[in-house]
Structure formats: structure tokens, C-alpha cells
């Protein structure tokens, strides 16, 4: 096996891994947005929040 063949194979591998990383990242963000959308509309239907009420001071607790 020559160095050129190894370089070509690793280039294809990096491209495939890049596409997989892109799909996983896009899927994560799409899922997160879907959960936020569903929970927002659920809370609107239950009367727990009013439209545009959450625009005030919203904090995000990561831990």
C-alpha cells in the first residue's frame, strides 16, 4: 500500500465522519427545538403561561 492510497482512504474517512457529525448535530438541535415547541404549546393550552409572557427574564439552568 502506498502513502497516496492511505491518504485517499483517510480523506474519505474524514469526509464520512464529517457528514455523520453534521447529521448528529442537526438532529440534536432539531430535537431540542421540537421539545421546546411542544412544551410551549402544551403550557399555553393548560393556561400555565400566557403568550409572550416568557420574553421577560428567562434563565437557563444547565446544571
Image (tube, rainbow, N blue to C red):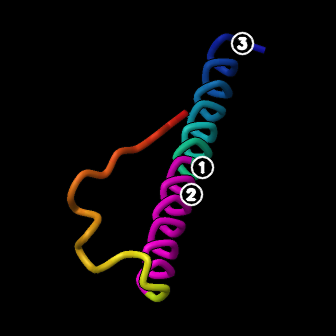
Extreme residue in the bottom direction: 45
Q: Which residues are magenta?
A: 25-44
- In 3D space, how far apart are the residues under numbered discs 1 and 2 (Cα atoms)? 5 Å
User: Looking at the rendered structure, which numbered label has been put on residue 7?
Assistant: none
Find residue 27 and report its horizontal and vertical position in percent. Answer: 56, 57
Cα separation, mark 3 vs mark 2, equals 38 Å
Residue 37 position, x and y percent, is 45, 73
Q: Is 49 placed left or right of 9 in the picture?
A: left
- Residue that carries the numbered disc 2 in the rendered image: 27
Residue 41 placement, left or right of 59: right
- The residue lying toward the viewer, choosing from 26 and 35, is 35
Mark 1 vs 2: CB contact within 8 A? yes
Of helix, strand and loop, which one carries label 2? helix
Above/below status of 26 relative to 35: above
Quick check: is 34 in the magenta stretch? yes
Does label 3 or label 2 sit earlier along the sequence?
Answer: 3
Residue at (42, 84) in percent of width and height: 47
Q: Earlier in the sequence, mark 1 or mark 3?
A: 3
Q: Nearer the viewer, residue 40 or 10?
A: 40
Horizontal relation, residue 44 to residue 38: left or right: left
Categorize mark 3 by other alpha carbons within 10 Å: few (<14), some (14-19), many (20+). few
Q: Which residue is mark 1?
A: 24
Residue assigned mark 3: 2
SS category of the residue bearing label 1: helix
**Residue 3 point in image, percent of width and height:** 66, 11
Q: Could you tell me which quadrant the C terminus lies in?
A: top right
Alpha-carbon span between mark 1 and mark 3 = 33 Å
Amino acid at each position: 500500500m502506498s502513502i497516496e492510497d492511505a491518504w485517499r482512504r483517510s480523506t474519505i474517512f474524514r469526509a464520512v465522519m464529517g457528514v455523520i457529525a453534521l447529521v448528529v448535530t442537526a438532529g440534536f438541535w432539531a430535537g431540542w427545538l421540537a421539545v421546546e415547541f411542544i412544551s410551549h404549546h402544551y403550557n399555553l393550552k393548560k393556561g400555565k403561561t400566557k403568550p409572550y409572557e416568557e420574553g421577560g427574564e428567562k434563565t437557563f439552568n444547565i446544571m
